[in-house]
Image (cartoon, grey):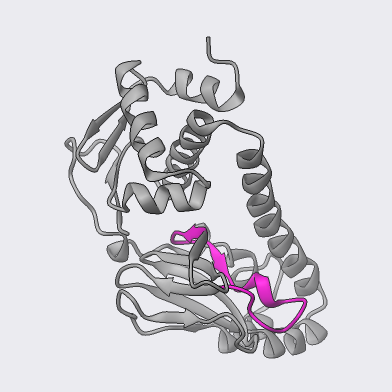
Amino acid sequence: MQIYQTKCGDSPFKELDLHKIEVSCASCSLSELCLPRGMGPEALEKLGNIIKRSAPIQRGEMLYRAGEEFKGLYAVRSGLFKAFVTADDGEEQIVGFFLPGEMLGLDAVETQVHVCSAVALETSSYCAVPFTKLSEVCKEIPELQNQLFRIMSRELSSENQMLLTLGKKNSEEKVATFLLTTSTRFHKLGYSANEFKLTMSRQEIGNYLGITFETVSRVFSRLQRNGIIKVNRKVINITDMVALKNLVSGCAG
């Protein structure tokens, strides 16, 4: 899977590799740790010493596997990651796609063992934060602990809200929610909320949403017939954002 997005104001369908997007610290989910307010140079240096930027990893390379020992948290700097669990019969269930500025690894905080696996879907990079060292720094800099809890809470709340939302919706509303959520996430990166390219398969979308790929295709066609989106192969253009939001909220006529 690869996702491309057009920068606000660019010509239609201009492609942009996510691995070329280098998220600034201000946009990153770890910005409150990297740049906490009111901290002196010495404290910032201690924090900076434990947050390490990775070398780029390639498509298909694993960040961690289910069952592996928890070593730390990972904030995506560029590229795209997929988190998934594998059933006893070998079937894969996608549990999330992670864009630049988002955090992985929270699944293992409680048990100290990862319950899902994470793989790069294209050339990607990340910031690694060893949890043991982070805990030690928190002891020296108490205000960091509250900031860490706030970040973890925000990420988990967002994930749980998505799962709860999808569980209560029909197939059309699920696909609409996926499109609107993707739109919102890219908009936070400074890119167009109305036009983006999704090169993941319909099957991958269906796997994540809990519906068949045939259903995903039918819903895309229906949304296009209703003038809510335009589909140009892999490019999605949201032509009626109000209607899409109404569909997500269950207010569509």
Residue farthest toward the top in the current orientation of the protein: 253
Q: Position of residue 221 (x, y in %)?
A: 31, 27
Q: Is residue 187 left or right of residue 233?
A: right
Residue 26 higher or lower than 186, as above or below: below
Residue 220, image x and y in percent? 34, 31
Residue name at image x 74 percent, y 59 percent: 153
Dividing the picture into quarters, in which one does residue 59 lie? bottom left
> In the image shown, does 218 or 90 lie closer to the viewer?
90
Q: Give the left or right position of residue 16, taking residue 51 as reference.
A: left
Does the magenta-highlighted stretch encompass residue 98?
yes
Q: x, y percentage for residue 149?
A: 77, 66
Which residue is drawn at the image coordinates 66% and 71% (left, top)? Answer: 107
Range drawn in magenta: 95-116
**93 inside magenta stretch:** no
Specify whether 242 is left or right of 103. left
Tell how many labels: 0
For the point 64% across and 65% down, the residue is 32
Q: What x and y, as percent, mark residue 1? A: 32, 59
Say whether residue 47 is left or right of residue 19: right
Vertical comparison of 75 with 62: above or below: above
